[in-house]
Amino acid sequence: MSFNKDLDIDSKLTKTGSFSLEEDHDESVSSKAAELPVMDTTYGWVVALSSSFILMISVGLTNSFGIYLTEYQLNVFPSTPTSTLSWIGSLQFGAMTLFGVGAGILAERFDTRIVVVAGSISTGLSLIIASFCRSPIGLVFTQGILFGISGSCLMVPSMSLVSQWMQKYRAVAGGSLGGLWSSYATEAFVAKLGWEWSLRITGFIVIAIGCVAGLFMRKRIHIARRDRLIDFGVLLNTRFLFLFSATVLAAGSYFIPFYFMPSYIEVVIGKPSFWGANISSILSASGVIGRIAMGMLADCIGPFNAVFVSSLLSSVAMLVLWLPFENLGTLVASATLFGLASGSIVSLVPVMTAALFGIKRLPSILGLLLISYTIGVFIGAPVGGVLLDKYGQGSDYRMLIAYGGALFAAASILFVVLRFIISPKLFVVV
């Protein structure tokens, strides 16, 4: 049994049809192909590493919000509903993806390095400003919305540039360090200095790392200016609609373990607060390994096959390991499997988008696709918080877990349908 590599996702030409859209044949690239820098070079890996650090201080930081949510829920705002507090974290990633369209346009029309450095400064300042807020609504606007808008200028360039510079190892190079460092750091900062200083210190770290890494975020392909900023014609493409819908469901489930496992381990299992940081770090550490592993798997069997495998395993982690049991061992196993599998929902989407629509206009098309994450985030943790408050009285997480697992299971169905739309052959790299 082996996968047949008769499907070239980079050239878009297959035996079952063509990936090409009108956009792929556009001649608006300002430099001829012969004049472009060579792909898969040392500088390409420099861009990949820089992108990894940029994703770490944007998307990666949202993974550690569960530490803040536990602190807000139990100590700072104990009378505020969990569903309200969860909006802070949901709006971080939600605003980041919603404003990804604008960030993609900025990344196409201006020097990417300027966009990333400016985004790093404003992202860090959003956390510093949030540290002076004394109400949930203030944190919603600063730690949530302002962080997300600023972070979009980090996320979109870092997700799209790797595909410009890397071809052979595109899926592996597209991985990131995630929130590996931030969970333990946040727990330590909150425990020793308080949540206010935790936000301030993190803000300065974001500015420092972003301004340095951003200097290496140079474009390989320069796009000529157009009157039409966004090609909404892509919304009529069947493959785009399936990818969009599947990503909505997967994104809805993705943050539920990150946000609610830290409080679950205290409320349900009865472990001390530092175990919240432990479980967040397990999710983040396994996520780093998983993004690399899923990237390698995608290079072998194709990103569409790999994302189906990852979404299916993510639903298993929630419905088979987390939902039926209430003990530390299975929770750790669930967090480990979920982290290993789910990270590809972020790292492989740019690879799939480049495979379907080409890399010339990837920032703007990817920005449009990122709206699916926005919708997913809004139907994920906030709805889960309502289920926890209304049906679980704040301590029974079963309805919340079942909801999250069902979202990922539904996403896996849509991903497999998309995979067979692209190629009906079973053993083919796609």
Image (spheres, helix red, strand yellow):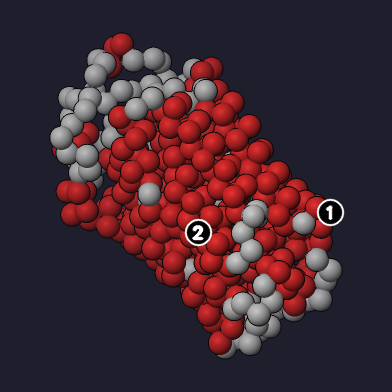
Give the amino acid at mark 2.
Answer: Phe
Answer above or below: position of 294 versus 145: above
Q: Quadrant of residue 194?
A: bottom right
Q: Residue 401 location in percent, x, y?
A: 58, 75
Q: Which residue is mark 1?
A: 192
Indicate which disc residue 150 carries.
Answer: none
Instruction: Read off the residue under disc 2.
Output: 141
Q: Position of residue 368 (x, y in %)?
A: 31, 49
One can see residue 184 in this view:
no
Locate the C terminus and report the quarter of the image it occupies.
top left
Q: Nearest to the eye among marks 2 and 1: give it.
A: 2
Q: Residue at x 84, y 68 (%)?
A: 272
Q: Nearer the viewer, residue 402 or 276?
A: 276
Task: Report x, y in % for residue 172.
Answer: 53, 36
Q: Name the foreground residue: 154 vs 298.
A: 154
Mark 2 residue crowding within 10 angstroms, few (<14) / some (14–19) / many (20+):
some
Q: Amino acid at mark 1?
A: Lys
State whether residue 215 appears in this view: yes
Q: How many marks?
A: 2
Residue 8's quadrant in the figure? top left
**Dot 1 surroundings within 10 Å: few (below 14), some, or many (20 or more)?**
few
Q: Measuring 67% from the left and 61% from the top, which residue is drawn there?
A: 68
